[in-house]
Image: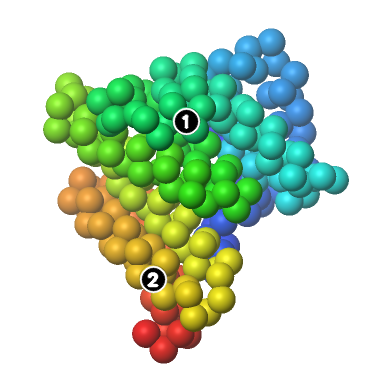
Amino acid sequence: MDLPRHHFDPVTLHEVLDDVPVAQAYRTELAGRPDRDTPDVLAVLVPLTRWLAPEADDPDSALAEAERLGWLAVRLNGGPGDDAAAAHSNASDVPLGSVPSLLRLAHVLQWRHRFPEADLLFGLALEAAHYYGEHAASIEHAHRLEYCALQHWGKCRYDQALEVHADQARPYLGEALALFERALELRVEAGAAPEHVAATREAISAARDRLAELGA
């Protein structure tokens, strides 16, 4: 089950759908399926609901629905049931299979500008991916999730830089750049797909451009 065609805005690094009406129809179809509350469908429905939120009559309600679905997906994959449970979870408490759903949920919280909560989930997902990269049978898969977590958390820190006054943006951009650069290092080492490497390089360029604008 694939996500609709999309690209990344070179300034915000947010996903932008290539064809909104087609994506809206697809989301309606998924939401009406009898298996809509299963992990495979939620893996598409959560990000798609988030991407479509800016086009909704009530974007906040759309993002709230994406958050509800996101927590459902995390629970179905064996992860923490709420933010309090996440705050008290260790990497070894989080199944590797719940890491992608944690990342999808963290992005929803990021778009809701609830950055401390998003940072908590991004951090937990990264710690879990790193842990399983050293202890799991599926080390290669864990490593892929680790560099995904690094890049996605970098986007959250980058987003925070765009939300604050320019005088306060530099530390967030510095953290974003460090996360992007580490993600690139791991992706190159792992022989990741060219489009994934290119996306990381684009994120690095965006962070460097913003830092240059601040005179860094």
Which residue occupies 44% across, 27% down? 85
The outermost residue toward the bottom is 215
x and y percent of residue 214 in the render? 46, 85
Q: Secondary structure at mark 1?
A: helix
Say whether disc 1 or disc 2 marks the residue closer to the N-terminus: 1
Which residue occupies 63% across, 29% down? 68
x and y percent of residue 147 in the render? 30, 47
Which residue occupies 52% across, 36% down? 105
x and y percent of residue 32 in the render? 75, 19
Q: How many marks?
A: 2
Q: Is residue 59 left or right of residue 98?
A: right
Say which quadrant the N terminus sits in: top right
Q: Is residue 155 above or below residue 165?
A: above
Q: Amino acid at mark 2?
A: Pro
Q: Mark 1 packing: few (<14 Cα in 10 Å), some, or many (20+)? A: few
Q: Is residue 92 left or right of residue 39?
A: left
Q: Which residue is mark 1?
A: 84
Q: Are marks 1 and 2 in contact (CB under 8 Å)?
A: no
Q: Is residue 74 above or below residue 119?
A: above
Q: Is residue 187 left or right of residue 2?
A: left
**Residue 141 visible to the viewer:** no
Q: CA distance from mark 1 to mark 2?
A: 27 Å
Taking depth in this image into account, of 42 and 179 the one nearest to the observer is 179
Q: Is residue 122 above or below residue 15?
A: above
Q: Which residue is mark 2?
A: 171
Q: Mark 2 packing: few (<14 Cα in 10 Å), some, or many (20+)? A: some
Q: Specify the color scheme.
A: rainbow
Which residue occupies 43% across, 39% down? 121
Say which quadrant the C terminus sits in: bottom left
